[in-house]
Amino acid sequence: MATNDVAQMAELLAALTQPNTDAIRAAELTLKPILKDPRCVPALLEVLKGTGTQPAPVRHIAAVLLRKRISGHYAKFDAPTKVHVKAEILSILSNEPERSVRHGTAGVAAAIAKLEVGSPQSAGGGNNWPELLQFISMASDPSTSNPDARELGFFLLGEMNETVAEHMRDQFPAMAQLFASALVPDTPAAIQNSAVSALGQLLSYLADEEGEDFVGGHFAALIPSILSVAAQCQARGDEDTVSVTLDVLYDLAYSPSDAVTTHLPIIVQYALGCLADDNLDMGVRDSAALVIATLAEAKPKTLGKSGNVEGIVETLFNLIENSNESAAGALFESNPAWKEDEQDEDDAPGSSNAMDSPTATSMAQGTLDMLACELPKKYIFQAVVTRCVARLASPQPNHRKAGIACLGVIAEGCSEPLREHLPDVMAQVFAAAGDAESQVRECACFCLGQLSEHCQPEILSYSSQILPIVFALLDDTTVAVQATSCYVLEMFCERLEPEGVRPLLDSLVKKLAAMLEGTTKRSVQEMAVAALAATAVAAEEEFVPYVAGVADLMQKMMSLQEEKMYSLRGRALECMGHMAIAVGKENFRPYFSGTMQCACEGLTFDSTELHEFAYAVFANLAKVMGDEFSPILPELVPHLVTVIGTDEGQIEQADETDRAGQFSALDDSDDEGAASGYVLHVRTALFEAKKGAITALGEMAAHTGAAFVPFLEDSIKVLQKAATNWHPLIKCEVAQSLPSMIVPSVAANHDGEIAWEKGDVTCANPMSEHTIAVVSAVLNDLLTLMDDDDKETVGKACEGIQSVIELCGPHALIPVANGCLQKTHDILSRKSPCQQGEEDEEPDDDDDHDSFMTSVCDLVGAFARVMGSQFNQYLPQFLPPICGYAKTSRPPSDRSMAIGCLGEIAQELESSISEHWESVFLPAVLSGLADEDDNVKRNAAFTAGVCCEGLGASVANQYPQLLQALSPLFSIDSSVSDSSAACVDNAAAAVSRMIMATPGSVPMPQVLPALLQSLPLKNDMTENETVYKCLLGLLQMNQPDAVALKAEFSRIFQAAVEEGSKVDDDIKAQLAAALPSLA
């Protein structure tokens, strides 16, 4: 290399160190062509080793550029040149006095090592740089007297992380000893930190390795030492090493290695120590919280069994109660309007920045939410609830705040045990709602909202207590309480019946309307609009008098043009859609055109949020307006198809932060074509919009009839593409919308209904060729989605298959029957892909209820409904796994689900279940009737009744046993809850079926008075026909005990025929005709 070349290189590199942007850019332009020439390597080397002639910053830049460019030129060198380059690098590493230059040179060595070990064409092939390993071994050896050399040795291992992990596994035992020698007391901090960093990077790389457990096999014993060094770093304020350690623990949380399980207690304790350390930066503490949350997600049973849950929960409670932050604010953290309003109320400077950072309360609540959602409830529920109760009894307001807030946080994850203990829970919540401290009342409101959202329908029985409390809180002077109160109304009213909201309807609508007009706080406005929408849905047609006034209010907001007001505009649009659902086509028709115009205008705005709201309105209005929606299909469907087919990822120009660090303009990549400098960005906001578009497309297909047929082909194609999307949100929505694609074909080719007979596959196929083709496409896609690894998607796929086969009959099922039955059986047996979790553990008998399994069991009932006696042959395979969920060790929801499934099978197969009666159905019924849970007893009563109805006289000898088991159900207080009322109703229906099946086997003098006393039905109106058919039959038979109780019959019939009764009109007519004879 000519001297002038080296001098020019040094001069250009020196220019890069100057605080002059123009000089730097000029030097980069000159360097670009020089760096393309392989001769730049020796020139850079000369500069790099010029310890006595070149300043350290220039030498450092030489190392940086050499690392960037060596990979592009190294293969062009002959063997002697390569040997020379490697020798020079080792020489520099041995003699360079400046740490920054040593580290830069280590990067060059790592780049060359990667090229050597992966290139058989290099001299000697394979690992052709043994001198480097010798250098590392000697430099890192504890006997080395030079601490800088030891630190450099471990730094080199860290730089070579990928190469070591992939190509030097035979060196792992020696490396483990090397690391162990550094992670001992009295080792200088710089050496320990470098060793922890290098070992951490290696463990993170190996964490996902399948097959041999390299982490557990070679490095597991070092985890305690890593945590010990990290704790020392934490004590002296070295947050970099703490952050590295937490990153490693996060990666290990997902690792299948036994090392994680072995060391789980100390991993948890270290993470908790960081989380609770006020001296650490909030970002570092947030990383510690993430470790705990990830362990809960990746290893729920292991963490639950480890004995650490109590300590974790106590730490999280302490964080919340020792913080002055609102514990209800976590509800709205993602809402820009909420943040803006909170900032307006906060006089402290810089508050906006604080709101964008994690807080102690938000970290604690987020972690607790993950624990509640992921851990088996037997490990988390009592640990949290006992602390909630204790805190709520405390004289300290911050303790009471934490107690009621945490009760709200676990509402989603622990909804089932909370529903079981709702009377006790609600007593605590109501007490907190009346607390003297505003922070406690605010959190009580938050808790009410969470319970209203996640403890349906049981929470509805508290409407008379909840609504007045929330109504009063709407007058609160703080934004937090106002907005949270509106949230409670929204969640609570969504499933409330008209009679539940009726007492407060007028004052509630006026109050919310006044809030809308009287506040400038967007967060309150948005929540008030959402509460109005939910109130309308609850009130149904009783909301008609308020439609005009509310529509006027919404119209003002639907015309907002300012970008920050888009969410309020969208909420107003959403409210119009909900009002349409509530009041129906005729009452909403005057507002249909204006609402559609606003929604379509929203599509012209560059706002995925407005698009999402528009798609939701399209879905609701298609449902309400039906064929009147059809004229807009040619405009909307192509738009929706385009949105659904759009890729969420796009190539965009990289930001400076996305580029490859220092002097990125001089990377090799600038020679590699136009794609350089660009990155793939996934537009997450598009997922929600795409989901909304899929929903809208499905609703349009389901409700516009034959008018949708011209759009079926394109719609099905785009849904098939979306079914392969990687995001479960999209796949789940596709599973829900695919069955709707069949409805237009049925409307066009079958006048809206396909006539089919249960189990009859010998007749001609009743479906048209077009319908057969659509059904085939839809069912095959749904079958594929049954193999998905997302449980909710699988559940929706099962629901979709059920709706298709119940609409189209057995001929639709035949082509896919084998696959469909097998996949369903696999899910029931917990062998499907979605049930193969991160942990390689056998399922426990007391595992928590998986909500998607209800859809699976409903599909089994549909098989019986459609296949009829053809399903008998599969009962020996299906009954055992179903009964597995009915074990007393299973949670109540599982037991209820399983016995309900048996009831559906018995109802459809009737006498065909006879060979399984005594071995399966009878034991399940008797166990269910003795269960402590009302929902289980309810389904057991239903199953008992339909079994007796289907099996007739053949089971009459078991009547005494069944009636004795049913008898306690008639003593249940129906007023306690909807579940208790439904339980009594189903007991009445069961006895009615038994009477109709074999009246002579029922001891009427004892049974009939109890039956009549339980009537009329209070909750399960689907059983009205059964009960009144029995009563009318007894009267027609002139059954003596019935005749003697005419007054009771008259009372029941009078109640049934009253205006407002929920008895069907045809039954009312029969009862009215019978009443005169009872006089």
Image (tube, grey):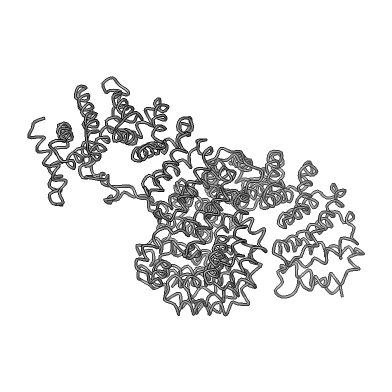
Can residue 766 be seen here? The reply is: no
Q: Is residue 926 left or right of residue 144?
A: right
Can residue 334 be seen here? The reply is: yes
Image quadrant holding the C terminus, namely: bottom right
Q: Is residue 523 left or right of residue 1077?
A: left
Q: Is residue 31 left or right of residue 476?
A: left
Q: x, y percentage for residue 813?
A: 61, 44
Q: x, y percentage for residue 407?
A: 58, 60
Q: x, y percentage for residue 799?
A: 59, 51
Image quadrant holding the N terminus, namely: top left
Residue at the (59%, 67%) spot, across then down = 395
- Residue in front for this viewpoint, 1071 or 200: 200
Is 5 located above or below residue 896 in the figure? above
Is 884 located above or below residue 959 in the figure? above
- Residue in front for this viewpoint, 846 or 819: 846
Q: Is residue 918 left or right of residue 715?
A: right
- Give the total of numbered labels: 0
Residue located farthest toward the left when viewing the structure as drawn: 4
Is 478 located above or below residue 90 in the figure? below
Q: x, y percentage for residue 624?
A: 53, 67
